[in-house]
Amino acid sequence: MKVLLVGVGGVGEAIAAIAKPRQWLELMVLADYNVKRAEEVQAKLGDANRFPVEFIDAGSQQSIEDLAKKYSVDLIMNSVDPIFNKQIFDAAYNVGAKYMDMAMTLSEPHSTDPFNKTGIKLGDYQFEKTKDWEKKELLALVGIGVEPGVADVFARYAQDHLFDEIEEVGIRDGANITIDGYEFAPNFSIWTTIEECLNPPVIYEEGKGWFTTEPFSEPEVFDFPEIGPVEVVNVEHEEVLLVPRWVKTKRVTFKYGLGDEFIEVLKTLHKLGLDNKNKINVKGMQVAPRDVVAACLPDPAHLGDKMKGKTCAGTWVKGVKDGKKREIYLYQVADNEECMKQWGCQAVVAQTAFSAVIAMDLLEHGAWKGVGVLGPEAFEPTVFMEKMAEYGFPYGVKEM
């Protein structure tokens, strides 16, 4: 398989590191706006022939198409902030390459009632084009990170093998990771984190469809394996938009353990307008406030040696099996020390990246097949889950 990797930040580096030992990977182009960053990753990998470096402007569809054609790639892997999704998604379609991402096209809140009604939902732009992709017999596999991604595979597995009826699919994410030397240092892209956490969270209910609520709503304490109790709150996330398309359930939610301090920082950024992703004039320069915030914070890709702890991502399913009520939590725990030792990448980005590489493996060997715009739930889950331990990311099952 020949892959154009658009974006070589923390997750992009982890994708390349996890894919490197696999014989099925013929070529992975390390394409980034910051060429020095791509060269840094290439030096770590130590294989310039299989991992060539290229400059790319992810905001230019033509730039993406030109590189895809130059290397005759089979797949374009989107590993940048989702503000660039439309260009990368459309470029893959135009050049006839498969497409994968870990976060779908962005939402836009309802203009008059944002905390009750959806406006443009996550992924709407992509799903509206599914017939075009089907006609061209091309596959766009959207939302194949950890959440969305592994969590969605777990939901499909629960439907196929663990339940007769499902009442609720609740994605729950928590961690006990600390970062030495910083008062405030997110372990994932602050740009994406702001987008997810300050947009109105989406909930799905059978008969009602998708609707929204206020950010950080419905707090609850969830007891995470290997971590312990963490308070989680509603956050906008792709699983709520993906799961109901392929899994029959009465309700879907996503809750994330942010912590009081993190929530207060996000609220402050919002009050000051620093979450704005649209450019403003600053002394004659056009600058997006959110980009300034991101530039002021440490790069999550370089925090691994300062991080300690574990992160847990999983799917809490409630329903009925053989006439009896059942609750299970299917999960994956990534330990930062182990991820740094094995991949040279911190736990949060490694956990996000491994499922993308497994998906590439399954597509390359024909274990997953499909055309159109599909989420992870559209595919047979067992073959994916069987590979998780092989890739160093085993899953667990907890009866609740």
Image (cartoon, helix red, strand yellow):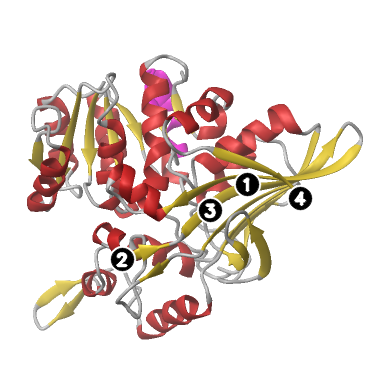
Magenta segment boundaries in residue numbering:
127-139
Q: Number of marks in the image?
A: 4
Disc 2 to disc 4: CB gap under 8 Å? no
Work out whether residue 6 or residue 177 is closer to the camera in this orientation and state it: 177
Q: Is residue 62 above or below residue 283?
A: above
Estimate the spatial distance between the alpha carbons at disc 3 and disc 1, rounded to whole Å: 10 Å
Seen as rendered, the residue at the extreme right is 323
Question: Which amino acid lies under the numbered mark 2 shown in the image of this protein?
Answer: Lys
Q: CA distance from mark 2 to mark 1?
A: 29 Å
Earlier in the chain: of badge 2 and badge 4, it is 2
Residue position for label 3: 312
Residue beneath label 1, please? 315
Q: Residues within 10 Å of mark 3 (few under 14, many from 20)?
A: many
Q: Position of residue 79 (x, y in %)?
A: 29, 45
Residue to which mark 2 is pinned: 306
Horizontal arrangement in the rendering, residue 339 relative to residue 45 (left or right)? right
| Relative to 125, 397 lies left or right | right
Q: Are marks 1 and 4 in contact (CB under 8 Å)?
A: no
From the image, tell me which residue sits under label 4.
400
Please tell me whether residue 130 belongs to the stretch shown in magenta.
Answer: yes
